[in-house]
Amino acid sequence: MNSYNDTPSLALERQPVRRLFRTYAIPATLATAANSLYNIIDRIIIGQGVGPLAISGLALTFPIMNLSIAFSSLIGSGSSAIASIRLGEHRYQEANKVLGNSLILTIIFSFLTTLFFLLFLDPLLIFFKASPDTLPYARDFLKIILYGILISNLFYELNNLMRATGHPKKAMVSILLTVVLNLVLALLFIFGFHWGIKGAAWATLLAQSGGLVWVMAHFLNPKTEVRFTKESIRFDWKITKEVCAIGLSPFLIHLCACVVIMLINMQLKRYGDIDFTGILIDGKAVAGGDLAIGAFGIINSIVGFMVMVIFGLANGLQPIAGYNFGAGRIDRVREALGLAVKWATAVSVVTFALCMVFPKAITGIFTKDLNTTLITARGLRLYVSMFLFTGFQVVTSILFQSVNKAGVSILLSTTRQLLFLVPCLLLLPSWLGTDGVWMSQAAADLLAALVTAGVLLYHLRKCALKK
């Protein structure tokens, strides 16, 4: 029998690593890129169809969205890594239990986060520096999205588990279908029905509902290797601890992102009101800080797209590294890491070049307002000036998460955000104004990459990844 065709999971141990990386990384990258591309197009639609202040309102939702994603990642990333390792150990029933436990935890966390955010929505948005001009947009968008947190979390977590358990193409298709449906509905609701920013929220919720039906059908299929069974849908404290231990790294990434985005918005509001004055939109005076926050929303979309491409490559690495680590094939883990770092660095270099050469052309796509375009273009160049090192840093952090080295992954995940970025955001703007906010990102990228390189070198030579 051809060993390559035994089962999707056994192929992770037997196929050449280069072929495996193409098999997993290409669908994962296309899926994450398509999903992030939707976010870009969605913000273009909002910017062109609703206005620049709507983009600012959307940017104010980022801390809450990241906090919701943090809890989703705690379960989803941890479950995916543990399931891959269990398959590598040929413990298939245990992989089913991981899947079932993930469902229970997702329902619990989704209910609690929805309740909390709905109770304190306006105070949170005001704390995040929403102004009377931007608060209505942020509130209208989030009220709809929050009711669909369970749908969103289940869809993305089960989609990651689908990829991690040997079905990367199906996982890619589910994301692509969701993205296409999302875009069609957003255009219809905003330009056809004139629902404004509420239309974008409804489009997202309905599209993810369709995606959830797709992934649930996969895991309810009795022919699927890892699937829901009556025995698997039971709370297991041991599995929960393992999932949370590994998922703690991406959880902290998003939690730190929540804190950082909140701080960025506060600093942009404070110094943007000073740096940019006398701005009019449709004859009405607008606070410069509101436009600076909108500029961050655009920059976050552009850079976030490229980061998600890198995460796609890292997600392609995850099942290969996790399975072969469980199977004791450390040589294959090292080879897969080398491929992922090479391609992620190429993405970083291309991103750096495009943003440095064409900043106005890129940012002008999002808005017709000249002031917003100029503010964003300058910020984009400063923001990505050290992006060259981001690919390496992200992939290496995901590697340690994949091979059950949660402590190392947490160290690398939080170093950039807390140890470097937060102090830079507190200090540099006091000297450089809004430029200091953008330059903080670059400084943190460089310093975090240096720490990551040192940690990886140590482990390659002396610890878990040594031959």
Image (tube, helix red, strand yellow):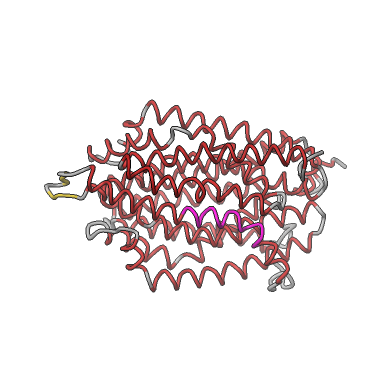
In this rendering, is residue 304 above or below 135? above
| Image vertical order of residue 298 relative to residue 198, above or below | above
Specify whether residue 8 is in view. yes
Which quarter of the figure is the C terminus placed in? top right
The front one of 385 and 213 is 385
How many badges with numbers are in the image? Answer: 0
Residue in the image at 54% along x and 69% along y: 109
Q: Is residue 349 left or right of residue 377?
A: right
Quarter residue 370 falls in: top left
Q: Does residue 366 appear in this view?
A: no
Q: Does the magenta stretch include residue 235?
A: no
Query: Residue 15 vs residue 382: left or right?
Result: right
Q: For the view shown, which residue lies furthest in the left direction?
A: 283
Above or below for 337 versus 35: above
Q: Residue at x 88, y 42 (%)?
A: 1
Q: Residue 330 appears at what percent x and percent y?
A: 79, 41
Residue closest to the eye, 81 or 144: 81
Tell me residue 46's x, y (percent).
31, 49
Q: Give the magenta-colored segment's residue range.
A: 244-257
Image spot of residue 35 (x, y percent):
49, 47
Specify the principal SS of the magenta part.
helix
Q: Position of residue 178 (x, y in %)?
A: 49, 52
Question: Residue at the right extreme?
Answer: 1
In the rendered image, the vertical position of residue 382 relative to residue 227, given as above or below: above
